[in-house]
Amino acid sequence: MPSIGTWLAAFFTLCMLSFLYKDNPFFRIAESFFAGLSLGYYIGIVANQTLKPNLVLPLAHEFSTNWHLLFAGGLGVMLYFRYIKRVAWVSRWALAVYVGYYVGVNMMQKLHGEVLPQVGDTMLSLSWNGIATLWNLVMVVGVLSVLIYFYFSAEHKGAVGGISRVGIWFLMISFGAAFGYTVMGRISLLIGRMVFLVNEWARPLIGLIT
Amino acid sequence: MNLERIMQVDRRIIYLFVAAGTILPIIFVIGLPVSITPPTQMAFDRIENLKQGDVVIVSFDYGPSSAPENAPMADAFLRHCFSKRIRVIVIALYPLGGLSEAVNELNKVVAEFPDLKYGVDYVNLGYKDGAQAAMRKMNENIHEVFPTDVQGTPISRIPMMKNVKTYADVKLCVSLATGIIGEWWANLVNAQFGLPVIVGPTAVSAPKYYAYLEAKQMAGLLGGLKGASEYERLVVDKYPGLAKVYATPGLYTATKGMDVQSIVHLIMIAFIVLGNVVYFTGRRKPRKAA
């Protein structure tokens, strides 16, 4: 016999799937449960797995070597000042530090981890070296034609128009590949739920396995 | 047969076909063949070339919402590492269920290898918030980012972590990812700190990872459920002892999932072809005068 947890999961799964027939109160109840549970889980996990071991315990056990963590904790507390109208401006200081940090991290990350390696990988040799050269040519033509498609300072007619139309073909092929993968991903999620319903709920229920 | 009626078929009829195409192959397993693609082979070879005792980070960067795709990848990677006696550090950087998935999958796979010892062969360091910041800091000191393991044991008391302080002490990172965290492993950790990275993303985000793979910013790629099924096959072919595990009745595997994928794809292709045939047949028919 399935456990209570399995029954609950099966009930909520069927509630969500019921939307495929039409919108209904069961779907809305399940949706609200999901949103509430997700938020509760998030608060709990951040408190237990990050705040406690990385802030509370180090301050409680070895304050003299970890006092600098007060700054990080203080910045976190400052964010909540936004709920007190009179001192709401304090939260902006903490936000400024967070934004500054992540802008700095992202700037280097994008430049060093995306722009430079990707540009470098597009600079391919076109001197004849068998079939590999043809693939290099496809890559170079694809990148250049798509870049020209997104170049809006010249009217897309004549040579520019022709090249940008080639760019559209490359874009369409890449969108097609991405869409195919997206379909596969969505079907995988359906498979996951159906496997749960069949193997963990329905089969024990009708005694096919046990 | 009235072709116009087919064009106006209720979408719920299509859902019924898809539901039947999903449920029947789950009950009656077909066992369609799995072909191996180069990105998955690269990932497998990379782990296969590691030595016994090497340390690998397995980062659970997904939650239950994408578990049908990512969990089989995680299981296959863990089984591969444990079969080769590679030591595994499990972490979770995805807030909504990453830790639950890490605990569940690790417990499931570890139960299949009873001679493994926690803290010596594997460790679960738990979840850490602010993934990018945690990734950066791990390059300086993993112990400061994860001062305790998931159960609250201080990291200094965990034997396998004594000599693992930074990325330099780790051979490889495997990220099972939904969303952007997998990309950060490639464009932050690999690009700036040089740690080889394998990513197992969901199928939805797989296309963009090919750019990183082409630019050699990743050492392998498992694209969605298909990639997971390929890895399962590679692992079973190399370690036949695992075949018994994968044949467990009722156990969900990517290989079984791909049976369903193939059937549902055929149903969708059939509907697309039918829709187009009806559409073009209707266009060719001369219209009656009003």
Image (tube, coloured by chain):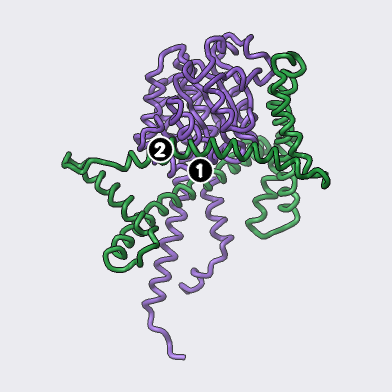
Q: For chain A, give the colour.
A: green
Residue A8 can be seen in this image = no
User: Given contact means CB atoms under 8 Å apart, are the residues at marks 2 and 1 in contact?
Assistant: no
Residue drawn at x 49%, y 50% is A183
Residue drawn at x 39%, y 24% is B46
Apparent side of residue B16 relative to residue A114 in the rendered image (left or right): right
Chain in purple, by letter, is B
- Disc 1 sits on a residue from what chain? B
- Disc 2 sits on a residue from what chain? B
Asked if labels 2 and 1 share a chain, the reply is: yes
Residue at mark 1: B25
In this view of the protein, which residue sits in the foreground, B196 or A176? B196
In this view of the protein, which residue sits in the foreground, B36 or B198? B198
In this view of the protein, which residue sits in the foreground, A16 or B54? B54
Apparent side of residue A129 relative to residue B289 in the rendered image (left or right): left
The picture places residue A109, in percent across and down from the top left corner, at: 48, 36
Apparent side of residue B217 relative to residue B161 in the rendered image (left or right): left
Name the image quarter holding residue B206. Answer: top left
Which of disc 1 and disc 2 is earlier in sequence? 1
The picture places residue A138, in percent across and down from the top left corner, at: 27, 49
